[in-house]
Amino acid sequence: MNTKIQRLSGTIAAQSSAQGTSGVAVIRVSGSGVKTIIKKAIKKELEHMKAELTPFHDQNGNVIDQVITLFFQSPSSYTGEDVLEISCHGSVAIADEILSSLYQQGARPANAGEFTRRAFLNDKLDLTQAEAVADLIESNSIEVARAAKNSLEGAFSKKIFSILDSLVELRSTIEASLDFPDEDLEETDHNKRLAKLFNETRNSYQALLEETRVACKIREGLVVAITGKPNVGKSTLLNQLAGHDRAIVSEEPGTTRDTIEVNTTIDGYSVSFIDTAGVRKTDNKVEKEGIRRAIEATENADLIIEVKDATQESMVDVKEANENHLVVYNKADLLNNKKRASATSKGVFLVSALQGIGVNKIVDNLSNRFKNTKDIVSTITARRRHLTSLKESFESFDIASKKEKNNEAGDIVAEELLQAQNSLSEITGEYSSEELLDSIFNKFCIGK
Ligand code: GDP
């Protein structure tokens, strides 16, 4: 038996709605034991996709709660297995009680992402669709949510499969020609046909590469580090940027990271600000970890906003300013009018963070970075790993194409094309390792 399947055997249960008190809590059960559990806990048969208001019994026959059940008969369910969804009153105690009685009655706690992993293993979703589920759940901008929905519906996989089909056609055309003498091939226009196919496939690759690059940027957003000497106004500027009427700050309570990293969307696009003013010596373990991450993020930031005190430093000849390094002269309110007029070079801003003057121009600059991507933003959601595999696949294809042009042996060209195919299959998960699956599904929450 496949070890992967073995590890996912058993009937699993977990709360799918968020933890904590709520109006309703949803508990999901999946696996071959679902019907037995229904017999014990619901004490009647449930029809496929028919909601029932019914008592839920514990293992001793006592009623825990009046619940609404929804049964999905295999294979017509999210996981492809029998699935039971239980909506109970959203009290933590009731949800816990129902879960423990499910464990008593034959289920086990689900691992992170196990419902979706089962859906993947039962061919309900390919890997890009499974990832789109996570993206959709985590999306904090409407752009990402739309793109994730498209990917979930298979928009991304379709494009990958279409290139895969072209690669298979190329390979079979080349392999079929291996046994024929050159004269025969010339007669059948073989080389022309092959060149046309290579050309078309190259165009498809390039379009998808561009789209994937954009999709990565949309999903992962822009990371902006705010740097500068103490007291120049970094925190004041950050507060202005995050508090701007075009910015929506997403709260992440319970972590000290809030003080260092502020996640916002500006005009619907995801932007994280790293405030290096929060980077200081501390003995607090959690804060230390936050600071380590902040420093790492600063090193990898897409954009640096360096803040200077305009009353202390001259604005003449600001060499360090460029597209990815903005220099912001702050405290403009303390300058006299003559000095104030002098911030004209590209990438240089003169603001008063305290009074909120000039901040709009910085917001425009950030928002404009996404504008050229606007036409294709909502088509798909993609991750760095997709881009990497797609690039690898294109490299192999490119080598194959060059070898073909140089009239190298057909089986060598076909071998490169096979390599290109394998790299693409990693994206959809047809060609995947246990490690890759672990790394993807372990990032899901329990109950997804
Ligand atoms: P940080 O150490 O770089 O984060 O600086 P802060 O944001 O904490 O600001 C340091 C001091 O400068 C505070 O007293 C702020 O009120 C003040 N400050 C910040 N921005 C401005 C500004 O635009 N104009 C004036 N006049 N004071 C400012």
Image: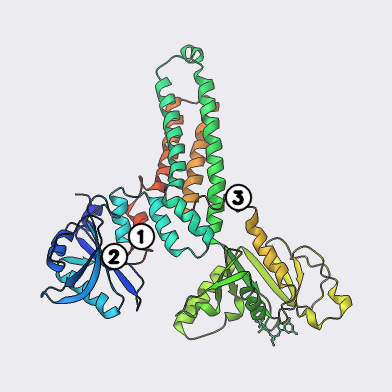
Per the image, label 3 sits on a secondary structure element best described as helix
Residue highlighted by disc 3: 375
At numbered mark 2, what does the secondary structure look like: helix, strand or loop? loop
Q: Disc 3 or 1, which lies upstream in sequence?
A: 3
Whether 192 is drawn above or below 319: the answer is: above
In this orientation, which residue lies closer to the viewer: 129 or 272?
Answer: 129
Measure how far apart labels 3 and 1 are at the Cα level. Answer: 31 Å
The residue that disc 1 covers is 441
Q: How far across and how far down the image is residue 54, in percent? A: 20, 68
* Callout 1: SS: helix
Please name the amino acid that badge 3 sits on.
Answer: Asp
Q: Is residue 302 above or below residue 97?
A: above
Mark 1 vs mark 2, CA separation in Å = 9 Å
3 vs 2, front mark: 3
Kind of residue sitting beneath label 1: Phe
Tell me the quarter of the picture where residue 406 sits.
top right
Taking the spot 39% from the left edge, 18% from the top edge, the residue there is: 179
- Answer yes or no: disc 2 within 8 Å of ligand 1: no
The reply, left or right, for residue 231 in relation to residue 78 is right
Label 1 crowd (10 A; few <14 / some 14-19 / many >=20): many
Q: Is residue 316 left or right of residue 381?
A: right
Give the labeled residue for mark 2.
111
Q: Residue furthest right?
A: 338
> x, y percentage for residue 220?
53, 61
Relative vertical location of residue 64 with respect to residue 320 in this rendering, above or below: below
